[in-house]
């Protein structure tokens, strides 16, 4: 299982530029031999410093009204390093690796309300061992002065106040990256491991790495020079054959036997070395396949997310369109109802007016009764005064004679 790793280092003014030289890859000849110059172009900044760290700090002081008495040996910056092991980054792939460091950057911006403005630089190194990020920030605390006024103060002691401050940092960092979907274990407590954190260069000095490597490369399995027994015999003139037979010859045979054993061991170690090389090759291929599978898995998850978002969008559009259509339908229906009601009123009013008109005609011209007038009109014109009767009559004619009236 891979671990979520975060480390913090407190730095004085005299120390920060050395960190900048390393972080910004300004040295012509790197003391750290793990740096691969052919991959340095892959490094990238999440927040890039324009000047050296000391100049950036002086600029920062001028632009911000900060309290605190700074001496030559005061801690003015902290450097955090975020990383995990190589197998973790091989597993998650390039895109998720970038997202991982983006989340680390967001984490420290919000940690203890630090704020992005107090971060001087954040650079991701992909040319030196496992991917990792160096983040330089000014340890600013938000507090109050003796009069109770709110002030911003540079104070690493207060920022990392408490014996468990680093434990809290590790807890918060682990919870953050875990919540963002990264499958990592929490880093072990230093109290449990009893280990001290060393830089790569410090570790190499402690283990005498370079000399050890040279000895291993130069070692030879040659039979040591031993005196020839016959030559010794010439000097002893056969007088001390007992010494030759009981002391010198057995020792000589033992040396030869040890030499043969060493050859056998060397052969076996060479064979095991080849097995390890093959295993490493296999592991690399396996990690590559796992990374590809993880990339595919992430792609599928992204597609699922896009599908859900698209489905949600389409459902919302459908609901909007359905609502609009229903509203239009109800509006049209309501309008038709009003028109229908109006037509009924017009028809009723027409009937009423027609009856009044016939009655008026009869009275005006002293004609027979209204019923007789209507009956004669309907008989002679084959037209009914009652509109409903007239429609039924026309329908009957249509059906019977096939006429379109």
Image (spheres, grey):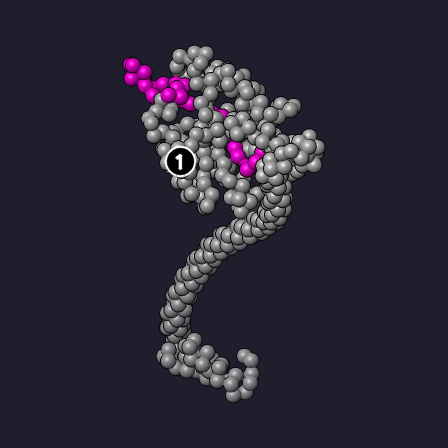
Q: Secondary structure at mark 1?
A: helix
Q: Position of residue 241 (x, y in %)?
A: 63, 37
Give how far across and how far down residue 137 sits, in percent: 47, 25
Q: Classify residue 320 as left or right of residue 237.
A: left
Can you identify the residue that label 1 sits on?
193
Mark 1 neighbour density, 10 Å: few (under 14) some (14–19) many (20 or more):
few
Residue drawn at the location 70% of the way across and 32% of the way down: 234
Residue farthest toward the bottom in the current orientation of the protein: 400
15 within the magenta span: no
Q: Residue at x 51, y 27 (%)?
A: 206
State which quarter of the image contains the C terminus. bottom right
Farthest-out residue, front: 239
Q: Viewer-proximal residue, 355 or 19?
A: 19
Front one among 350 and 201: 201
Instruction: Give the camera-side residue of 130 and 57.
Output: 130
Quadrant of the rendered image containing residue 161: top left
Label count reads 1
Residue drawn at x 60%, y 37% is 242
Residue 11 at x, y percent in the picture: 47, 20
Confirm whether residue 56 shows in the render.
Answer: no
User: In the image, 381: left or right of 170?
Assistant: right
Which residues lie in the magenta part?
A: 128-157
- Can the viewer see residue 186 in this picture? yes
* Front-lying residue, 94 or 282: 282
For the point 53% across and 47% down, which residue is it? 91
């Amino acid at each position: 299982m891979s671990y979520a790793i975060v480390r913090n280092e407190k730095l004085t003014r005299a120390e920060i530029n050395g960190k900048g030289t390393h972080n910004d890859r300004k040295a012509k000849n790197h003391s750290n031999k793990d740096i691969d110059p052919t991959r340095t172009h892959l490094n990238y900044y999440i927040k890039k410093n324009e000047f050296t760290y000391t100049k950036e700090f002086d600029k920062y002081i001028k632009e911000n009204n900060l309290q605190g008495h700074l001496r030559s040996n005061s801690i003015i910056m902290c450097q955090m390093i975020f990383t995990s092991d190589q197998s973790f980054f091989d597993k998650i792939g390039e895109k998720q690796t970038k997202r991982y460091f983006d989340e680390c950057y967001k984490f420290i911006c919000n940690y203890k309300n630090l704020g992005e403005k107090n971060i001087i630089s954040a650079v991701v190194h992909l040319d030196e061992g496992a991917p990792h990020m160096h983040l330089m920030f000014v340890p600013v605390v938000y507090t109050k002065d003796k009069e109770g006024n709110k002030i911003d103060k540079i104070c690493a002691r207060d920022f990392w106040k408490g014996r468990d401050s680093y434990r809290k940092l590790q807890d918060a960092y682990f919870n953050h990256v875990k919540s963002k979907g990264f499958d990592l274990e929490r880093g072990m407590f230093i109290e449990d491991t009893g280990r001290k954190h060393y830089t790569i260069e410090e570790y190499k000095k402690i283990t005498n790495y370079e000399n050890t490597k040279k000895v291993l490369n130069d070692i030879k399995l040659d039979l040591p020079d031993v005196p020839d027994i016959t030559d010794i015999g010439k000097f002893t003139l056969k007088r001390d054959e007992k010494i030759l037979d009981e002391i010198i010859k057995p020792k000589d045979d033992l040396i030869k036997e040890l030499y043969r054993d060493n050859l056998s061991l060397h052969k076996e170690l060479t064979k095991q070395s080849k097995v390890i090389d093959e295993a490493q090759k296999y592991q690399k291929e396996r990690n590559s396949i796992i990374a590809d599978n993880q990339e595919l898995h992430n792609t599928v998850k992204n597609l699922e997310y896009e599908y859900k978002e698209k489905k949600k969008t389409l459902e919302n559009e459908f609901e909007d369109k359905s609502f609009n259509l229903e509203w239009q339908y109800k509006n049209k229906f309501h309008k038709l109802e009003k028109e229908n009601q109006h037509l009924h009123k017009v028809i009723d009013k027409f009937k009423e007016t027609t009856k009044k008109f016939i009655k008026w005609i009869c009275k005006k011209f002293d004609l027979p009764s209204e019923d007789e007038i209507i009956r004669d009109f309907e008989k002679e014109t084959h037209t009914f005064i009652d509109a409903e009767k007239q429609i039924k009559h026309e329908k009957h004619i249509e059906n019977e004679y096939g006429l379109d009236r």
